[in-house]
Amino acid sequence: MSSIQEKLNSDSGSKPPYQLTIQQLEKIYNSDANVGLSDNQVKENSALYGENTLGKETGVPYGKIFLRQVCNAMILVLFISMIIALAIQDWISGGVIAFVVGINIVVGYYQDVNAEKTMGSLRSLSSPAARVIRGGNDLTIPTKEVVPGDIVIVKVGDTVPADLRLIDSLNFETDEALLTGESLPISKDHTLVYTHEISVGDRLNMAFSSSTVSKGRATAIVVSTGLQTQIGMIAQSLNDNKSKVRQVEKDENGAAPKRAYFKAFFGTLKDIIGAFLGLNVGTPLHRRLSKLACGLFVIAVIFAIIVMGSQKMIVNKNVAIYAICVALSMIPSSLVVVLTITMAVGASVMVTRNVIVRKLDSLEALGAVSAICSDKTGTLTQGKMIVRNVWIPGVGTYAVSDIKKPLDPTTRSIKFSFGSPVEIAENEVNSEYSSTVPSPIPNKYASWLKTATLANVAVIFQDTSDPTVEPEWKAHGDPTEIAIQVYTSASNFPRESLTEGENKRYDHLAEYPFDSSIKRMSAVYKDLSTNEAHVFTKGAVERVLGCCKYWYGHSSGKTANLESIKEENIIELTEDDVRTIESQMEAFANDGLRVLAFATKLGDPKISDAEYAKIDRNQVENNLIFLGLVGIYDPPRLESAASVKKCHKCGVSVHMLTGDHPGTAKAIAQEIGILPHNLYHYAEDVVKIMVMTAAQFDALSDQEIDNLPVLPLVIARCAPQTKVRMIDALHRRGQFCAMTGDGVNDSPSLKKADVGIAMGISGSDVAKDASDIVLSDDNFASILNAVEEGRRMADNIQKFVLQLLAENVAQAIYLMVGLVFIDDDGFSVFPLSPVEVLWIIVVTSCFPAMGLGLELARPDSMEKPPKDPKEGIFTREVLCDMMVYGLWMAVCCMGCFVAIIYGKGGGQLGTQCNDSYNPSCNYVFRARSASFANMTWCALILAWEVIDTRKSLFKMNPESETPYTQVFKDLWRNQFLFWSVIFGVVTVFPLVYIPVINEKVFLHKPIDYEWGVAVGFSILFLGGSELYLWIKRIHYRRRPDEAHNPEYDLERNSPFEKYASFSRATTVVDGNMVQLIK
């Protein structure tokens, strides 16, 4: 426990600062709100609490990162393979393997160095200086010297230097978006003292380190510094302090038996060796590849020993080389480089789809994502406030739709309903929206528009400074005021038309700015045509109503018509009228809207124009006429609803974790399909689970969360630890999750998630550094692009892994079985020479595998369920395919060799045919040529066969209009793979016929009729492969693997059906207990 927390616990009864009075905090820190700390007390607190930093600066451990890249099983096996290849003077294979090793080390090193910079970004958030009161003096000191108990003064534009408890404030607002995810500045209130635990975003008497002051000023006492601040706790959570040294298990008395020490020692040794070889670190795919490399290395050694044993352990140079080649044939030397290059190419493709990949390892994980936890503001929504509804009493309700650009008043349509917000919510008669807006504009609506545009200081304009680009709409001011100004401009009431130009109608006289304690603002203008002053007011509904005495009255939308809405009878507000207005406000609020009220009046003729700027606002803001309400919100992106539906279609659940209020979060979630629209169809207890606040969720233990029938779809007022706990809960349910985030507060959850997704536009450097991928457009729809590309990558990785390993299996079986051919001297005759083996490995593995990595996504890839991350690429289907293809290829190649040796050759195996050519080796050399061609072609045919692991090579597009020629179009589509195969096929001919190279190097000779045998067995391999695929199609036709809820199911069965299935359960979520009664 920290010294700060210990002191708080001992002196305050474990209460946090936001639950304590200033007097209590002064006593705890021996400070004084007027004088501050004395010099001695500063030294004492500095020694007790340390510097106000996020930890000591540490450099990037370059050496450690380099060793981490070198010391893993696959790289070490490749090192051994390289040494062996160079030892037998196979410079081509040795060079290729050296390139593989180099590129893996360089790429991995670069990625890890970038990842180590996360903490540096956190430190850069600190404010360089702070203004404090010490010993009664006003001082400016470095932020790192601030200590708990210091009295700090902050103003507009300052970065808060530490966590503060407010002593005094004036119109004080802070931007905590990076910390809490709140989309708007938070208005603070120093007078509050809380009696219960609340979330960080609701602590209005606190200001937090690294947030910025957006309005006003404040004096505060420092309550937390350094790593004990909210930012500091996030920084600590990003530190990975896992030790590989296992602790000795001790009993209650601190004693441990000897076996516990042995267990800890050998466990630590196992962990260190596993980490050295990459068996227990890195991504699931890398761990599997490391285990595969170790297993294949062991098998390769065993096979090499078998080769030498078959020769009675008489190991000459040729036997040794053959044994080494058999071993090399078991090691897919090009696998890692093909994997790395394929991922790098995939990353470059993702850039064109607004996804920037920071860590190549994340690409393998994207295909397995089964749950997405997304922030709301700027990701699912546009990140811009807009007016959604306007209610004018006695007229009706206006609604905005078709908003493409939030700041462009020309890209929206306005609809109208005679009904009030309550009537519209209850689907009353005559309450439907219509595109026909009353014309001419009713005077009551015109009065509201005039008030909305004049009681507003925001500015919107079209930027035409650069004639080479299309003019862009921009704005300055408060987001809420900008939204209102855009709406009035869309309704042909821009402020400039009333206050500027030759025909201006109003002169500005005075302004009473928004005050957090009053929660309203007013502007006074002089009507130039009448020389009368007008007061225009807007603000919180309850505060504006408190200043109103009159209104135009309200009539039911059922009886309203175009004539009735023209009536302008001002009547006095009654208590019933106030309740009516408040019910309309609640209807807007239930839709997640931020509601403001508007009012106006004629100025007092006894007050001169000059006096308005001097008199108290209470003399002006009274006896107002209530005009109407506006509902403002951050609208969903146009593509969000479709993207959420696609997520459901491909078996991916979507959860919204936001810092916004529950009503806003719920409304947006319903609008885009995260929550069902018809919540009334579900039991109340189930709805409470669907939508929870962070306080409710965090109050549950892990066991209680696991006992919930389903996890919440929406969590509002989220704190950093809430998001982490949600990820842990998903993991305990076997989900593979992606988390989006943009603020510092999201960094722990981004790091904890299987795939961390940061925002490229609004995201902080810390969030980007902690993430795996970054969305360059901050758009939820781009996540689908990433998932689709991830699935394509996962499918393609499976394809080339299958092709490489099936070829390894074929070579190993062929070469091992070939040992049974005994020549006249009693030694085995090798069915392929060592150089032939190495050439086949080089030509048929690297480039065709890379071509497979470039294959396009399957048309149905987003209709399949997510891949099981535990199963990875080595599924049962892949393992079965690998053995079938490998065995069949070995059989075909062996059949080719045997047909020539025992056909026309009569079984003549000659003598010393493994050393050089002599007349007795004629048929052996000719059989090798045919088998060399046959195995090369079979391996290349396999590369085409696995393009689709179930469909026939000749019917990959069964719905094609040109079925007989479609195969050629399909093969030509991937030109890299096409030319890789053609190159491999063609290179066989010169290697068979070029003198010296054929007989001296490859140990084979020119052939004639044997070409027919090689072609025949290659066609046989193709036919057998097609037969196998036909059997697979029959098998999987009975076991479809479509997603749990594809488009068809979405139309018939709701994706929320699992929630409805629990509607009969009694689930009590009271913050402390969860009970399930089935």
Image (cartoon, rainbow, N blue to C red):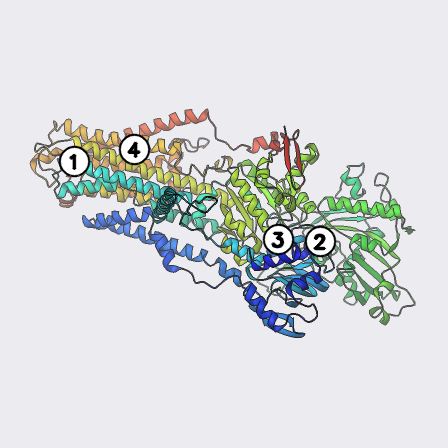
Q: Disc 4 or disc 2, which is closer to the eye? A: 2
Q: Amino acid at mark 2?
A: Tyr
Q: CA distance from mark 4 to mark 3?
A: 54 Å
Q: Which residue is mark 2?
A: 194
Q: Amino acid at mark 1?
A: Gly
Q: Amino acid at mark 4?
A: Gly
- Quarter occupied by the C terminus: top right
Q: Disc 2 or disc 3, which is closer to the eye? A: 2
Q: Which residue is mark 1?
A: 309
Q: Which residue is mark 4?
A: 886
Is residue 475 shown above or below 669? below
Residue 331 can be seen in this image: yes
Q: Which residue is mark 3?
A: 181
State the image coordinates of residue 385 (x, y, percent, origin top left).
68, 53
State the image quarter where residue 533 is shown: bottom right
SS at circle 2? loop
Q: CA distance from mark 4 to mark 2?
A: 71 Å
